[in-house]
Image: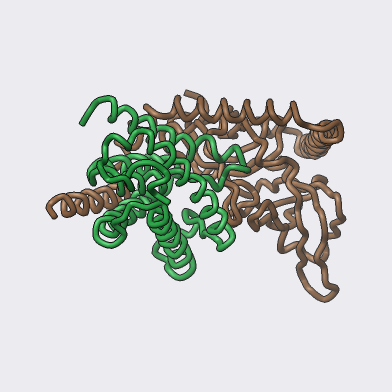
Amino acid sequence: MRWWIGIAILSIIIFFLFAFRLFQPIANAFRFISLPLVRTASEWTQSGRDWVGAATASTDASARLRCEALLNKHVVDEAEFFRLEEENKRLRAQGNFLSTSSYDHVGARVIGRELTQTRARLLIDRGTNDRLEDGQAVITENGLFIGRIRSPQTGVATVELLTDTNSRVSAAMVQGDQLIGVVEGRGNGASVLTYIPSSVDLEADQIIVTAGTEEKIPAHLALGIINALNRKPKDPFYDASVDPLVRFDRISFVSVLRPSALGAR
Amino acid sequence: MKLSRLMVWGGMAVVCILWDVAIAPFLPGLRWVEPVLPMLLFFAMFQSVLPGFLFGGCVALFMDLYQLAPWPGMTMFTLIYLFILTVLSRRVLTNRSFYSAYALLVLGRLIAFFLGLFSHGSIGLWDPATLVPMTPSHLAARLIMDFVLLLFIFIFSSRFQRTLHSSPTAGGLVGYF
């Protein structure tokens, strides 16, 4: 029975090392050793899946993918256009330039993914050694906001996607800076824009963007598109379901926005 | 312990880790295939205790490292499961048949199911964000895939085990059924 006692003691030690974050240096060393292998495996898996997908995709599926790409580009262009318009107005009014380029970005590869009923998370191969911090905005390569950084560690970090049940992001309409509600993740690939004041008139197919009220999330990043409104005449607030602009199961590369001050070494 | 055997076990551990962390998440059709528990079962039933704990502990620890969870949930679950598995396979279900192996595997899945359900539903001690409750349909899908995996492991291991055990039921597939 001695070995049982040994294993029990070892388990308790591991648990407490984890709980009090004393395991961190050993964990970092393990991750440092294994990360290249994990990265290569995920890269090969994604390449293989894409290759098989491309080889078996029908003409309709290819056309749909092209349409999705065009739509995404249009959405980003539109959001960017209104952002520039707003900026222009502000510049004229204030007469001084408020720099909107106070963020730089760092590219990252998706090495793990968890899309379940309640969780929607990605694991990326960048961490605290790349100046990643909790709450930083994560966008796709074409500028669509998909989530924020959670639990960055040495070499790796988790991205909490918009549809994760813990995700909350303040949203605004693409025209104007007014905060119109909070996009809450509901799991299973769904998210809902909640607490929309009844004075705000939203319509289906309208694009919503980040409001910029969170500390590390810039404004005017395209968030999603309004799908259906759940509105009752006497309620002070109403909800709207939001469709993401990107398929989370297809993301291979992302960019993390970090304040320039953090990016500069 | 022979070096070649150690290398085979090490290789299997690496495959299990990579499968869980970097391969299965990108292949939605194969997400129900989870080889760790059937492998643990194999170690508990047909090998000595220490290799099973070494294999299970290392694989689960790496999984926890890539889950970025604040507590080593997978490691704890694996060690508890291995303990129960070892006791049951040595005291109760000692016949080493495919059916008893599958019964132990079902037990493991049920432990995971109720741990997730219990902790997620009623205890605020663990961070709900780090727990993924398994639904009954997920459990059923895993059990079906476990059956296939276990069958594969039995067929595969029979090629290597036949010479190691004198008992006819510990060798080939025919013996297990």
Find chain A in the image and tell me its colour. Answer: brown
Q: Nearer the viewer, residue A138 or A165?
A: A165
For the question of whether residue B89 can be seen, the reply is: yes
Q: Nearer the viewer, residue A193 or A125?
A: A125
Residue at 22 percent across and 43 percent down: it is B50
Quarter of the picture holding the N terminus of chain A: bottom left
Here the colouring is by chain
Residue at 46 percent across and 40 percent down: it is A152
Q: Quick one: which residue is furthest to the left in this view?
A: A2
For the question of whether residue A102 can be seen, the reply is: no
Q: Quick one: which residue is furthest to the bottom in this view?
A: A234
Quarter residue A81 falls in: top right
> Residue A211, percent across and down?
70, 48
Residue at 59 percent across and 52 percent down: it is A116
> Residue B99, percent across and down?
42, 56
How many numbered marks are there? Answer: 0
Q: Is residue A255 left or right of residue B101?
A: right
Find chain B in the image and tell me its colour. Answer: green
> Residue A16, percent across and down?
27, 52
Q: Is residue A70 above or below residue B140?
A: above
Residue at 38 percent across and 34 percent down: it is B159
> Residue B56, percent across and down?
33, 44
Q: Is residue B114 left or right of residue A114?
A: left
Q: Nearer the viewer, residue A53 or B146?
A: B146
